[in-house]
Image (tube, rainbow, N blue to C red):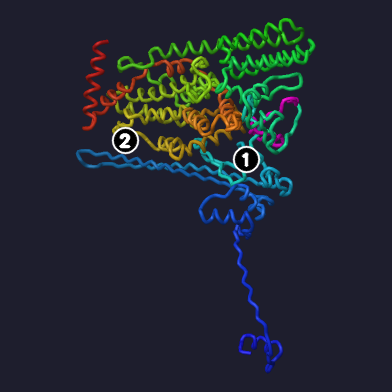
Amino acid sequence: MDDSEIQETVESILGKGARVVDCEKKSTIREEEVLLVNGCPIRLEGAEGAVIRDALIHGTAPHSDVLNQILIRAGILSAPVRLETSLSVKSTVVTREQVTVARGGRVVDGRSRETKEDNYYTSTTAEVWEPSGCGKKDSSSGASSLTSVTKEDKFSSASSSTGRSSTTEEDSSSSSVDDLVGNDVTDRISGLSINGHEPTIFGTVASDQTPKDSTNCRRSLPQTTPPGISNGSDVHSSAESNPSQDNSVMYREGNLVSGRLEALIQHMVPTAEYYPDRAFLFAFLLTSRLFIKPHDLLGQILAFSEAQLKAKQAPAKERAHLLARLVQLLGEWSETFPYDFRDERVMSHVRDVAHRCVSVEGPVRQEVSLLLHNLLYRLKKLEQYEAFLHSIHTEATTTSIEALSQTEVSEVCGSAVSLAQQLTHIELERLSYIGPEEFVQAFAKESPALETSFKDMKQTRNLESYVSWFNRLSYFVATEVCKHIKSKKQRVRVVEFWVETARECFNIGNFNSLMAIIAGLNMSPVSRLKRTWSKVQCAKFSVLEHQMDPSCNFSSYRSTLKAAVWRSAAATDDSQRIVIPFFSLLVKDLYFLNEGCSNKLPNGHINFEKFWQLAKQVTEFITWKQVHCPFPKAAKVITYLQATPVLNEDALSLASFECEPPENHEKDRYKSLKAELGNCTTSN
């Protein structure tokens, strides 16, 4: 036997001199591909392994179902998972002041002072995800469904997804209430998401997010009970995607996801046993105007209702009950979309219902009377508001500095805190008049792709007026700075006053006024005043600019907004509930949400999943605009801010050149403006 290794092994067992007569040696080589997930080896076997292998080779992402299976085998989806997110922000502002006294060219005294301001904010979010059903697979996706078990402390965050839920534990401390810094906790493990509470249309999203009652687990916004089931009963539909009997409405996990227009309209029709839930009412009334005009929609609802009664030969008692349901439907419609009732064609249907109620005994008479009274009140208030807007826009701009008010805004409003509060009054008042349907009309103007015309549906322009207010406030800030042609010291004081006002707006949660002030101070006529800015303490302004930085799709602002929403959800003081978003960005987000998905599916169904998302965003806006402003109202200041004339763009540029002489590349612009505006002044 020539194998010395085998001989040595035998001798070590049997002793020296042992001879190996015969030996059989076998070698087995086993190869397997293993994927390590958090240190746990997962064999890449079968079809799933082939999919993962191909994805790794080609650098693509495999299907989520395959990933979920891998996570289950790794034990991640069958054991508790703790997710922690922490954010620490520290800002230091060092101010050095040096004063030197010289006499006759000789320095006789020198003083210096240094102040240091440290602001520190830290927040930690911890979530524990636990499997529901001990890892039992869900029939629709093949993945374990997860729920979280957490404690709730100061804040509670919620967003929406399908089939999975979580609440968060928020521990927040800060040494400066002036630094309201948000913590973006939207990054999640693939397949794990947060299912928010049900946003109520006539209540508030904030109240649903508040952690006062953690045991109240509501369903998310995409929901509706199938026709024939009373909305008062808590019925859970099948988790799978099932069509209705006539294949005209599709459900998934109990949520309506698509349907034909006629079927969705029938879903709106109340009966003796069925009344549509408010979430569906709001979503459909908001978005149905993309396909059918409100007066046609109401006409079809009444026609369907009358046809049902005739088909059943309903007795008088059932007719009275159905009339009460129709009045309830009109009441909720007029409460959320009152501007639809400015259309005489809609009001003709309302009068028809009112006439039917006159001949019916019972409380329905009082209910329809109350409906008409409340509707008239809302429309009257809108008319008064529009008359007010028209009056203050009559002489909104001017080209002459002489035409400007000589009164300083700091004289009218003694402090930056008070000015920020009055700006918040204006913002909340203007927000309160914006109808939810105006968002749909904003990104769905007349288009060949749409099946309806918006020309005769546009009953109000409050959204446009609110955007105009933002622009006016920016020009107002720039005018207040540039009108002080002869005094650099005065300009410095005005700039610092507006920076302090912007900071107070930030603390309140008034981000629209904050952005308008920043935009005004960054306008070219103001930003070019280098001598003025050299004397301004810019540290606070730089912090505010960073918070509203547009880079990364306004990521800093979005985190701050989320923190403000959390604060509002847990607030016990009205001043802490205020959230006024940067409105132009809100409209932009809704626009891209609308553009990102088709209104109709290939089978001709209306894509109601998209409309759930639109309704959810607008519902949050309704929550924000319904907040009461708790600050004392100063009518004189509010009138001054909204009605005082401001300089237009050319006049601002000319005033800026008068404040600080133009540089070489600006001289031609200065000459042309002086000639043009000088001629205008002479002709006037």
Q: Would residue 40 be seen by someone viewing this image from the given angle?
A: no
Q: Please name whichever residue, 460 or 434, is drawn nearer the observer in this view of the structure.
A: 460
| Helix, strand or loop: magenta stretch | loop
Q: Residue at x 65, y 33 (%)?
A: 220
* Secondary structure beneath label 2: loop
- The circle on residue 194 is 1
The amino acid pointed to by label 1 is Ile
Q: Residue at x 49, y 13 (%)?
A: 386
Q: Please name whichever residue, 273 or 500, is drawn nearer the observer in this view of the structure.
A: 273
- Quadrant occupied by the N terminus: bottom right
Q: Which residues, given as a range, are shown in magenta? A: 207-231
Q: Position of residue 476 (x, y in %)?
A: 39, 22
Q: Would residue 364 be seen by someone viewing this image from the given angle?
A: yes
Q: Badge 2 is on which residue?
A: 534
* Secondary structure beneath label 1: loop
Q: Residue furthest left?
A: 104
91 lies above or below 282: below
Q: Are marks 2 and 1 in contact (CB under 8 Å)?
A: no
